[in-house]
Image (tube, rainbow, N blue to C red):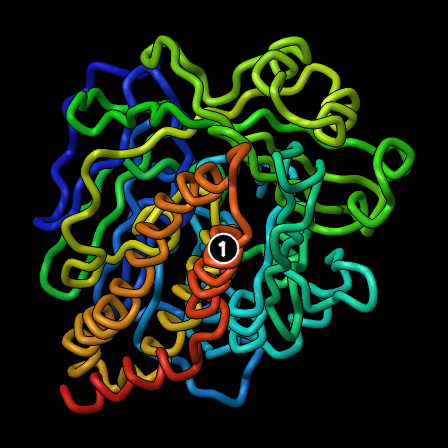
Amino acid sequence: KSTSSPRPSLPRGLRYYETHDKTINLNALVITLSQQYCIEDQAALETPKAAQVASLASKAVPSPPDRNMDTPSRPLHVAIVGGGLCGLALAIALERRSISFTIYEARPSFTELGAGINLGPNTLEALRLIDPALIDEVLRLCTRNPPPEEHLWMTVCFGGPTKRFKDANIVTKLNAPPTGNATVRRNDLLQLLANSIRPDHVSFNKKVVNLTKTVGSVALAFSDDLLGVDNPAANPQYSGVGAYRAVVPMHELEAAVCPSIASSSTLFLGPDAYIIMYPVELDTRVNIGLWVHRLGPEDEREWVDPSTREEVRAKFSSWGQTVHKIIALVGDPSFWPTFCHTTQPISVSSDRVCLIGDSAHSMPPHQGAGAGQAIEDAYVLGEVLSIVSSDSDRCNDQIEDALKAYSNVRSPRSQKVLETSVEAMDLWCSLYRDDVTEEEIQHFARVAQERFHWIWHDNIADQARRARDTIMIAK
């Protein structure tokens, strides 16, 4: 529950993203950069339920050993607040570029909520650029569409019959070459990334409650018992949209519907709703999300609500037999409402502090693109920091230049992905009608493919090059 503590001040241009009477966990909230790093009072930092401060000061302290031992250490240490997928990806990017860092994670261990995650071609390319050795390990965890459609992102079908088309009629196939839709359990991917980082780079049970800046330093304040700070203006609002979620065994779904539907990533379109499902856990289980508009008492909603199969059946009563066979397998699913902030960050960087991942551009999953943008953030930020000068007299200014360059390159793209992800819910719910025509289907297929192409096939390496060139000009 929220406390009555006053809200600590933040640098100009940054806003709190907190909740009232709820606990919110955002990954990689703040990336705090400094010329040198040290803990002023180790005893205080380790004292439970005490206000704790880690100071990023200009003192010279030994840098933790890097894997690339032939690269000289830099007068730079990065504090990563939040050890989710984005924070860990950034940590790997920094370690491979011999940049010192510490991850501060509020939980006692690395954990990730949610069943599955979609990795598009851009996400896998960003992971490869972060660390070429990482991509093979990631792909070993992933489930892909079966041959000969490994390049497929989603098969889009109708969720019921119409005057002209049968139940489960294929509307279009969205192709995402060369990798298609690679799916993985969120926690499996998180643990893989965590295992790539040395334990001495991580500090658990650290909730950041404030930061202060002086010339050449940034200080983080921690508390072990603060879960939220009252700030009604920043409360996330229920969007009226959410998903019934379930994971079912693959063999049960194959027996209920045709195997080609069960084993491939599939999107069902229907009236005012859509259903997405895709294999996970190396084709042994299928993750199912039934996305609907659901009105209700917004202020009483929890992050996850219990539900019943009868409620889902009633919501999809007008859909076809294929969908009802799927619903019969989901048991009593949980309902995950989508909350949103009415105010987005004014800026993702301020001096030597910046936001990445969900803290900078949290988005609904209607394009399966949020994780990809977070991984792109991590790669570009790692690249711009890698050219910060080893000269301590120049390091401070170049940190700020690097963060500005990161923001200038990444913000326009990530914000566009955010906006189109919000719009996609309406796109998936707009086509199905009893009198839908072939011409409307063809137009929909073109629009759907075009809205993904620029997300999947942007030149990720060129993003970093453009950002680095900006810093070189600033030098």
> Which residue bears the numbered disc 1?
439
Q: Residue at x 48, y 70 (%)?
A: 93
Q: Is residue 282 above or below residue 254?
A: below
- Quarter containing the C terminus: bottom left
Q: Is residue 349 left or right of residue 43?
A: left
Considering depth in this image, is 408 or 451 the residue closer to the camera? 451
- Quarter containing the N terminus: top left
Considering depth in this image, is 430 or 10 the residue closer to the camera? 430
Q: Residue at x 66, y 33 (%)?
A: 161
Q: Tell me, yes or no, if residue 253 can be seen here.
A: yes
Residue 38 falls in image quadrant: bottom left
Residue 176 in the image: state x and y as whole percent: 60, 67
Neighbour tally class for label 1: few under 14, some 14-19, many 20 plus, Cα within 10 Å: few
Q: Tell me, yes or no, if residue 88 can be seen here.
A: no
Q: Is residue 279 left or right of residue 68?
A: right
| Element marked by disc 1 | helix
Considering depth in this image, is 331 or 408 the residue closer to the camera? 331
Q: Is residue 173 left or right of residue 40?
A: right
Q: Is residue 428 above or below residue 58?
A: above
Residue 35 in the image: state x and y as whole percent: 25, 70
Considering depth in this image, is 203 or 181 the residue closer to the camera? 181
